[in-house]
Amino acid sequence: MAKFGIGRAAVVACCLAAAALGVGAVRPDTPSPPQDGNTPAADPPPGFLLVASSQIGDPRFQHTVILLLRHNQDGAFGIVINRPVAERPLAALLEAAGDKDSDAEGSIGVFDGGPVQRRLGFVVHTADYRQPDTIAVDGKVAMTASKEALRDIGRHKGPSKYFFAFGYTGWGAGQLEGEIARHDWFAVPEDAGLVFDEDRETVWEHALARRGQDL
């Protein structure tokens, strides 16, 4: 199935970068992201945060906060934003993706983005950066899955804020709506501070507190 217009070469490149981190194999029984297109967004719309309730039944998602990147009648797709794994040099990630002579400087935070297709890699970033395959979410945050995004960050030409995630969280048609209905998740408007700036250990508590403010 389509991956929201992410080019095949870009996906392969980020797969290699994620594989260099020793991530696990793809699970064959998990849904692919819903297809992009002109399908109207469902509720909650892309850009919202999904905050796991304290009673969520799946232990993989306890105290997680997910940035929703796509949600329509075909399903939903998001990235966990509060499970940092490591800080890795950009040059090392690019070398793993085939750029052995990269001049990229600096490092990037690496996150566990979710349990689905953990060999896929994604750069989540502010909306001040765009490539042809960038997924614009809500005018504040965006996602790009390409080596070029990592190169630009390493050359100080990339977005102002960013992180790299391997894997994602996916739901088939109607699944997320069912989980919200049984109160596994609370939806709150996206906050760039929570996505990029907040101490990762406090993101869940602060996002949960926002639910009360938004009611």
Image (cartoon, rainbow, N blue to C red):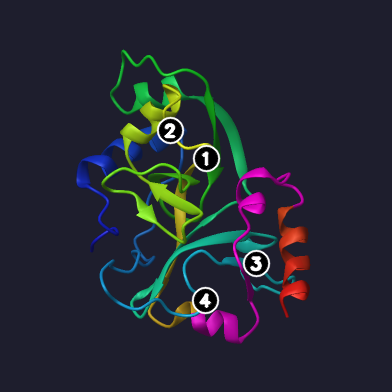
- Say which mark, if any, is on residue 162: 1
Of the two numbered discs 2 and 4 on the same chain, state the one appearing first in sequence. 4
Circle 4 is placed at which residue position?
A: 44
Q: Are marks 2 and 1 in contact (CB under 8 Å)?
A: yes
> Which residue is painted at 77% across and 60% down in the image?
205
Which residue type carries mark 1?
Answer: Tyr
> Which residue is painted at 39% across and 56% down in the image?
136
Task: Give the number of the mark in front: 2 or 4.
Answer: 2
**Residue numbers of the magenta segment:** 177-202
Residue 70 image point, x, y percent: 41, 66
SS at circle 2: loop
Magenta segment includes 199:
yes
Between the residue at mark 1 and the residue at mark 4, the CA separation in whole angstroms equals 23 Å
Which residue type carries mark 3?
Answer: Val
Q: Are marks 2 and 3 in contact (CB under 8 Å)?
A: no
- Say which mark, if any, is on residue 158: 2
Circle 3 is placed at which residue position?
A: 51
**Vertical comparison of 129 with 59: above or below:** above
